[in-house]
Image: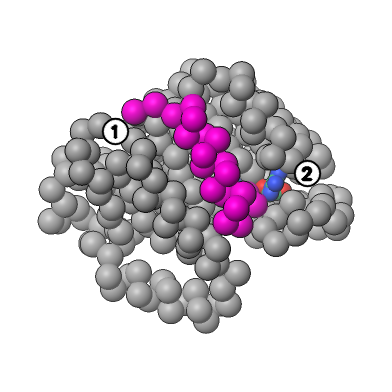
C-alpha cells in the first residue's frame, strides 16, 4: 500500500494529466455519453436517500463485530474486533462512487451482477436498487459482517440480492459456475495483484460484449497498479476508464481499436 504522501503525489499527477470530466475532446460517442449521462448526471434519485440513511445509522452503530480479515496483505484470516461504525467509515465506498455505480447499473440495466466484497451491504443496496429485476450476488468472507449486511438488505426490502459467505477463491468459481454470463461486476476486496488478476480472468470467462467490470482502488498500491495495467491491456478489453479511485472496463465491439481514458472526476 502506498503511503498517504505517495498517494497524494499519484493523485496530483492523475489530476493534472487526466482529461477534464466534461467530455471535451473525447471522440468516442459511447464514452462521451458515459461522461455526460452517467458521470455527470446530477439527478437526486430517491434511492440515494434510502441508502444514505442506512449509512448514517451504520456510522453511529457501536456494536462490536469479530472480523475475519481477508483483506489485502493478510494471507490468512486473523480475527479482530471492530465496531460497525468503524467498518462503515473505513471499508464502505464513498457516497460519490457508490452513487456512480448506482447510475451505471440504472443506465445499462445489467441482468446479472456480482460484487466481490459486500462489507455492510451499502454498495450492494445501491446496485440492487438500481435494477430491481437483476440477480445480484455479493460475496463476503467475514460471517459477522455478512450477517449485518443481510439485515440491512432486509431493512431496505431488497429482494434481488443474495450474500454468499466464504473466501472469494472458493465462492467466486462456484457462483460463476451457476451463472451463464456476468453483465456487471464490482471487484472491491482483496486488493492484491495476483488475486485481482485471477478474479478478472475468472469473470472474463463469463463476460459478454456488453459486460462492464469495475475495479476499486486501482492506484492504492504498486501491486494494484500492475493488476490494473494488465487488466486494461488484456486483449478482450476494448475500452477502459481510469477515475483514479476506480477503473472501469468495457468489452464492446464498437471499439475497433482499444481505447483508454483517464478522466478527472
Ligand atoms: C472494501 S470492503 C467492500 C466494501 C463494499 N463493496 C462497499 O462499498 O460497501 C471489502 C470486503 O471484502 C472482504 N474480503 C476481502 N478479501 C476477501 C476474500 N479473499 N474473500 C472474501 N471476502 C473478502 C472483506 O471482508 C471486506 O468486508
Confirm whether the magenta stretch covers residue 152.
no
Residue appearing at x 41%, y 61% in the figure: 244
Residue 96 visible in the picture: no
Display coloring: one colour
In the picture of the structure, the residue carrying the numbered disc 1 is 252
Question: Which residue is farthest front?
Answer: 235
Earlier residue among tags 2 and 1: 2
Q: Residue at the spot x=29%, y=33% of the render?
A: 252
What x and y, as percent, mark residue 71?
70, 55
- The residue sitting at the bottom extreme is 5
What is the quadrant of the N terminus in the image? bottom right
Q: Name the residue under label 2.
A: 142
Q: In which quarter of the image is residue 246?
A: bottom left
In contact (CB < 8 Å): disc 2 and disc 1: no
Residue 208 in the magenta stretch? The answer is yes
Q: Quadrant of the C terminus?
A: bottom left
In this picture, which residue range is highlighted in magenta? 188-209
Give the tally of numbered discs. Answer: 2
Question: In this orientation, which residue lies closer to the viewer: 154 or 192?
Answer: 192
- At mark 1, the secondary structure is loop
Please tell me which residue is depicted at 56% across the width and 20% down the height of the picture. 179
224 relative to 259, above or below? below
Tell me the SS state at disc 2.
Answer: loop
Where is 160 relative to 75, above or below?
above
Whether the residue under disc 2 has CB within 8 Å of ligand 1: yes
The picture places residue 154, in percent across and down from the top left corner, at 69, 27
Amino acid at each position: 500500500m502506498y503511503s498517504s504522501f505517495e498517494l497524494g503525489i499519484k493523485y496530483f499527477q492523475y489530476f493534472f494529466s487526466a482529461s477534464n470530466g466534461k467530455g471535451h475532446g473525447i471522440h468516442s460517442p459511447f464514452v462521451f455519453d458515459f461522461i455526460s449521462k452517467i458521470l455527470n448526471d446530477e439527478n437526486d434519485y430517491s434511492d440515494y436517500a434510502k441508502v444514505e440513511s442506512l449509512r448514517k445509522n451504520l456510522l453511529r452503530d457501536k456494536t462490536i463485530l469479530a472480523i475475519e480479515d481477508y483483506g489485502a496483505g493478510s494471507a490468512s484470516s486473523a480475527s479482530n474486533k471492530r465496531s460497525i461504525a468503524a467498518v462503515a467509515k473505513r471499508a464502505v465506498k464513498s457516497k460519490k462512487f457508490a452513487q456512480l455505480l448506482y447510475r451505471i447499473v440504472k443506465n445499462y440495466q445489467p441482468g446479472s451482477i456480482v460484487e466481490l466484497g459486500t462489507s455492510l451491504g451499502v454498495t450492494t443496496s445501491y446496485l440492487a436498487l438500481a435494477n430491481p429485476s437483476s440477480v445480484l450476488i455479493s460475496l463476503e468472507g467475514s460471517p459477522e459482517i455478512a450477517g449485518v449486511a443481510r439485515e440491512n438488505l432486509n431493512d431496505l426490502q431488497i429482494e434481488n440480492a443474495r450474500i454468499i459467505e466464504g473466501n472469494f477463491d472458493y465462492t467466486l468459481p462456484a457462483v460463476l459456475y451457476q451463472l451463464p454470463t456476468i453483465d456487471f461486476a464490482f471487484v472491491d476486496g482483496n486488493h492484491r495483484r495476483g488475486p485481482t488478476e485471477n478474479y478478472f480472468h475468472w469473470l472474463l470467462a463469463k463476460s459478454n460484449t456488453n459486460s462492464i467490470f469495475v475495479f476499486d482502488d486501482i492506484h492504492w498500491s504498486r501491486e494494484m497498479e500492475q493488476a490494473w495495467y494488465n487488466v486494461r491491456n488484456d486483449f478482450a478489453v476494448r475500452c477502459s476508464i481510469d477515475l483514479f479511485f476506480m477503473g472501469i472496463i468495457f468489452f464492446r465491439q464498437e471499439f475497433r481499436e482499444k481505447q483508454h481514458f483517464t478522466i478527472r472526476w
